[in-house]
């Protein structure tokens, strides 16, 4: 036993407030907040600013709660993967029971308060999102199918729909297409990353497309999803949330995204290794801009529309 | 021994306690704000009690 360990405090590993907050996956929450905010503001029905603020907050809390439940269930695989080994449960800061209690409590809190603050359609959608992410994705399909990224992407795509429903009380073509935007964007975004970052999902026995079907098939999958994404993304421009700024942004970004996906599909591993995955890395960076710019453009068009710029 | 002497536990858990305190304060502010917004809206109506409308 070392001298340092003899003098180590028995409470050194005690959880701080930040460890409990980390259970809510704050980085994922930023995307949830942004897209829910856009969905809420793009809706044709105005809401009181404070109610809107609370709606986005409760959607974020619901998203965070599902993150905590995901960490509760996946603590075994988080412990064996380098990327997730420092999460509060595998790091020994928070117990699984605590994570479960926090996740369940915040889930109920977020759904009930979203319903009371706005309406029960939005609350129902939030409840379904949490159920879908925790039960359908985390517990059922994540460890079963290499299409897990597609299913996980669906859970992450609900916030703009919930934001829209919080304002209008319903589901519309525009809100479904906003869902499709994030849903179809997730697979090419993640699989591009999987091509150039060596992931240790194998150790955790989570099937990843790059391993189960090979890198050649992953490249083809990226292209297929990018083509589908372009159709739905540009289609969104012809609904009530679309406007000149959105259409111009979408056409330009989809052209660039498709060009990148075609390049990825045409390359083989030897070519990619020769230039250190330059094309894949560029495509991944573009994917980050792609989603932010699409939702940002919806926001800009909604703002210009309210100012009466387009007449 | 003074009654106000700070225990080591208090120091150790200060961050946690302040965090929980702030969350609770934010929760109260949100409920207060939401209630205020809802009752000051033009279409806000108090539902009459059944017994009162029936004249019982």
Image (cartoon, coloured by chain):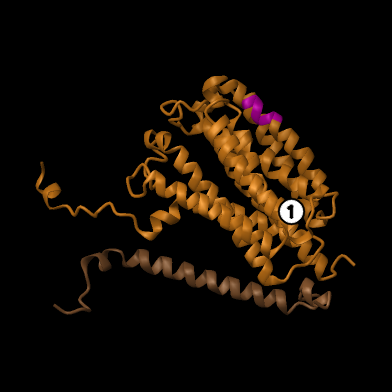
Chain colours: A orange, B brown
Q: Nearer the viewer, residue A255 or B4?
A: B4
Q: Is residue B10 left or right of residue A201?
A: left
Percent x, y for residue A266?
65, 24
Q: Quadrant of the C terminus of chain A?
A: bottom right
- Pick the quarter of the image with the N terminus of chain A: top left
- Residue range (magenta): A219-224
Q: Residue at x 42, y 55 (%)?
A: A20
B33 relative to A294, above or below: below
Of all residues, the one furthest to the right in this rendering is A311
Residue placed most toward the observer, A107 or B48 = B48
Per the picture, the main secondary structure of the magenta-coloured stretch is helix
Pick the residue in front: A125 or A299.
A125
* Numbered-mark total: 1
The chain letter for the residue carrying disc 1 is: A
Asked where in the image residue A210 lies, by quadrant, the reply is top right
- Which residue is most to the front? B56
Residue at the image point whose x is 43% and y is 29% from the top: A204
Image x and y of residue A253, in percent: 71, 45
Residue A51: where, in percent of width, then height? 68, 68
Residue A293 counted in the magenta span? no
Helix or strand or loop: what does disc 1 sit on?
A: helix
Whole-percent x, y for residue A186 in the image: 63, 39
When asked about the image quadrant of residue A184, the answer is top right
Q: Which residue is mark 1?
A: A121
**Residue at 53%, 23% in the rendered image:** A269
Q: Residue at x 56, y 23 (%)?
A: A215
Q: Residues within 10 Å of mark 1 (few under 14, many from 20)?
A: some
């Amino acid at each position: 036993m070392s001298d340092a360990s003899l003098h180590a405090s028995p409470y050194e590993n005690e959880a701080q407030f930040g460890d409990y907050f980390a259970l809510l996956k704050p980085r994922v929450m930023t995307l949830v907040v942004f897209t829910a905010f856009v969905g809420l503001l793009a809706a044709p029905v105005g809401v009181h600013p404070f109610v809107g603020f609370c709606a986005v907050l409760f959607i974020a809390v619901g998203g965070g709660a599902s993150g905590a439940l995901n960490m509760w269930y996946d603590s075994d695989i988080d412990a064996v993967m380098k990327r997730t080994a420092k999460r509060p449960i595998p790091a020994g800061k928070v117990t699984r029971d605590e994570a479960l209690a926090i996740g369940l409590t915040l889930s109920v809190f977020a759904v009930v308060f979203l319903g009371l603050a706005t309406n029960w359609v939005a609350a129902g959608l939030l409840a379904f999102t949490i159920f879908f992410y925790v039960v359908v994705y985390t517990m059922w399909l994540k460890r079963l199918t290499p299409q897990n990224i597609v299913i996980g992407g669906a859970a992450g795509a609900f916030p703009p729909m919930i934001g829209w429903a919080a304002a209008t009380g319903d589901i519309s073509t525009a809100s479904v297409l906003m869902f499709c935007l994030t849903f179809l964007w997730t697979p090419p975004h993640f699989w591009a990353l999987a091509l150039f970052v060596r992931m240790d999902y194998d150790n955790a026995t989570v099937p990843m497309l790059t391993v189960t079907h090979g890198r050649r098939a992953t490249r083809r999958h990226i292209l297929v999803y990018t083509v589908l994404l372009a159709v739905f993304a540009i289609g969104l421009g012809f609904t009530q949330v679309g406007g000149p700024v959105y259409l111009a942004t979408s056409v330009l970004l989809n052209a660039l995204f498709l060009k990148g996906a075609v390049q990825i599909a045409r390359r083989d591993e030897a070519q990619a290794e020769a230039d250190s995955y330059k094309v894949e890395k560029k495509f991944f960076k573009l994917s980050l801009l792609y989603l932010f710019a699409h939702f940002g453009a919806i926001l800009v068009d909604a703002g210009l529309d309210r100012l009466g710029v387009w007449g | 021994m003074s009654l106000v002497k700070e225990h080591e536990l208090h120091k150790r858990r200060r961050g946690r306690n302040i965090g929980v305190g702030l969350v609770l304060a934010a929760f109260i502010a949100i409920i207060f704000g939401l209630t205020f917004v809802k009752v000051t809206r033009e279409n806000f109506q108090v539902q009459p009690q059944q017994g009162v409308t029936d004249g019982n």
